[in-house]
Image (cartoon, rainbow, N blue to C red):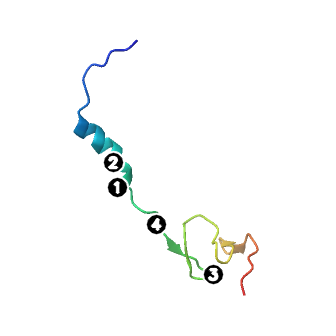
């Protein structure tokens, strides 16, 4: 069984644990078809287009 060499301090542990809260929000881009915000490299949830092609049918209007 391994024996720890040095104790990790409470402040160092808490800093490591809290880093997930500092992550940036995902970037968004404008869909070229409907101009709604969408995630890059994903199908637009509003119109169903990806790379100027309709990938999924959507029931809008």
- Tag in front: 1 or 4: 1
Crowding at dot 1, Cα within 10 Å, few <14 / some 14-19 / many 20+, comes out as few
Of residues 58 and 29, the one drawn nearer to the viewer in this rendering: 58
Crowding at dot 2, Cα within 10 Å, few <14 / some 14-19 / many 20+, comes out as few
The tag on residue 33 is: 3
C-beta proximity under 8 Å, tags 1 and 4: no
- Tag in front: 2 or 4: 2
- The image shows residue 50 at horizontal and vertical percentages of 66, 70
In terms of secondary structure, where does tag 1 sit? helix
C-beta proximity under 8 Å, tags 2 and 1: yes
The residue under label 4 is: 27
Number of numbered discs on residues: 4
- The image shows residue 4 at horizontal and vertical percentages of 31, 19
The residue under label 1 is: 22
Separation of residues labelled 2 and 1 (CA atoms): 7 Å
Q: Quadrant of the C terminus?
A: bottom right
Crowding at dot 3, Cα within 10 Å, few <14 / some 14-19 / many 20+, comes out as some
- Tag in front: 1 or 3: 1
């Amino acid at each position: 069984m391994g024996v720890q060499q040095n104790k990790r301090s409470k402040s160092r542990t808490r800093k490591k644990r809290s880093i997930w809260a500092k992550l940036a929000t995902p970037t968004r881009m404008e869909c070229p078809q409907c101009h709604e915000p969408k995630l890059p490299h994903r199908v637009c949830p509003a119109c169903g287009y990806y790379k100027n092609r309709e990938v999924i049918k959507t029931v809008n209007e």
